[in-house]
Image: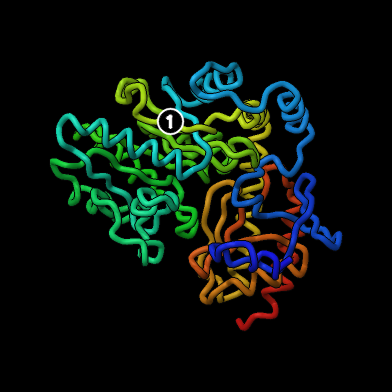
Amino acid sequence: MVSKFEQYFLKTYKKYNITFVSGKGKYLYDVNGKKYLDFFSGLSVTNLGHCDKNLIKVLKKQIDTLWHCSNLYYSQPQVVLAKEIIKRTFPSKVFFSNSGAEANECAIKLARKYGSKTGRYEIITFENSFHGRTLATLTATAQDKFHKGFGPLPKGFKYAKFNNISSVKRLINKNTVAVMLEPIQGEGGVIPADKNFLCELHKLCDKHDILLIFDEIQTGFGRTGKLFAFQHYDVKPDVITLAKSVANGIPLGVTVVDKKYEDVFNYGDHGSTFGGNLLACVVAAEVIKMIDNKTFLEKVQDVGQYFYQCLCKLKDEYDFIKDVRGIGLMLGVELTFPARNIVEECLKHGLVINVTQEKVLRFLPPLIITKNDVDTAIKILVKVFSKCKK
């Protein structure tokens, strides 16, 4: 398998030497039949686990009905999904695409179009952010390591310091049209925004007629214990971008735009051939109904808090654990040394986790896990950590 991939694929992913062939609920199975507890969920994608029976049911029904319909025509699944999203966010209009990068591209274009009447075009993003890998979203991603070799990058992006309102104020000028950020920086190392910072940022954007864009591609759909992360902060953005878990693994991106800006785009200003694919839409509508449940979300908060406390106990025991942070079931453990070997050792013991920023173990388990699953994961981490020097 490894040699075949090297033969056929461009070198864009540094893969682990493992081949998964099936999944069920919170478990993955490799080519040899070995079972793994999945605490990564495909990078916060399969929030309801693998091959959920309810999602399979609605997917199969749509497969037997209609797979694709051009966006030049109306379709019922898109309307149903749009209604469900708008009902749970704020009065808005939506645009459907295929991925998070595309959802952010739409937000960037919307902001640029909004500012075009007055000549405003600059967008402020934040150091350590991640917004995608297209040229525009790559530039919005304020991490130099992603920029190398792809210049010249598009102009019009300025970088502020996360959780530092003064740095934002210094960058605002007559050309500023939008501020875009993640409520919790995911690829940046699982760094939550401070509530006061977001509140001040909201006031600042209102004062200067600047669009406030929340990238909730990794934090949306229950990941933090609320349906959307912005609900933790009592701050309503003008635009929300969504993807990853919205259809539990079926590709779909969503850009949610406050009705105040519904007339910014004209016919032909934006589009997507596969955006709002009917298969993705029916699954996403079911995902929202299953997650947007008080009991379900309270369980995510409860299990997330339990997991956080367990990780904090590990921090007290192992001096190479520098920090534990996160919200709900989006948690990070920062180590004092590169952590890829930790991830590889956990795989050997049947636990799937991730590392970002070289030294931050990132945990994004399916939202259906239990405290017993957390205990299992902690036992594996203890086995792996105990082999490390204190």
Q: Is residue 202 above or below residue 185?
A: above
- Using the rendered view, name the quadrant where residue 54 is placed: top right
Residue 1 vs residue 137, the one in the foreground? 1
Pointer 1: residues within 10 angstroms few (<14), some, or many (20+)? some
Residue drawn at (33%, 37%), measured in percent from left and top?
109
Residue drawn at (59%, 30%), measured in percent from left and top?
277
Q: Position of residue 141 (x, y in %)?
A: 38, 54
Left or right? Give the position of 27 relative to 117. Answer: right
Three-letter amino acid code at the position of disc 1:
Gly
Q: Position of residue 237 (x, y in %)?
A: 37, 33
Q: Is residue 332 above or below residue 108?
A: below
Q: Is residue 58 above or below residue 196?
A: above
Q: How is the image coloured?
A: rainbow
Residue drawn at (50%, 32%), measured in percent from left and top?
273
Specify the quadrant that holds the N terminus. bottom right
The residue that disc 1 covers is: 271
Residue 261 visible in this rendered orientation of the protein = yes
Q: Is residue 385 above or below residue 247?
A: below
Residue farthest along the front direction in this orientation: 7
Residue 139 vs residue 239, the one in the foreground? 139
Residue 232 visible in this rendered orientation of the protein = no
Q: Position of residue 43 (x, y in %)?
A: 60, 51
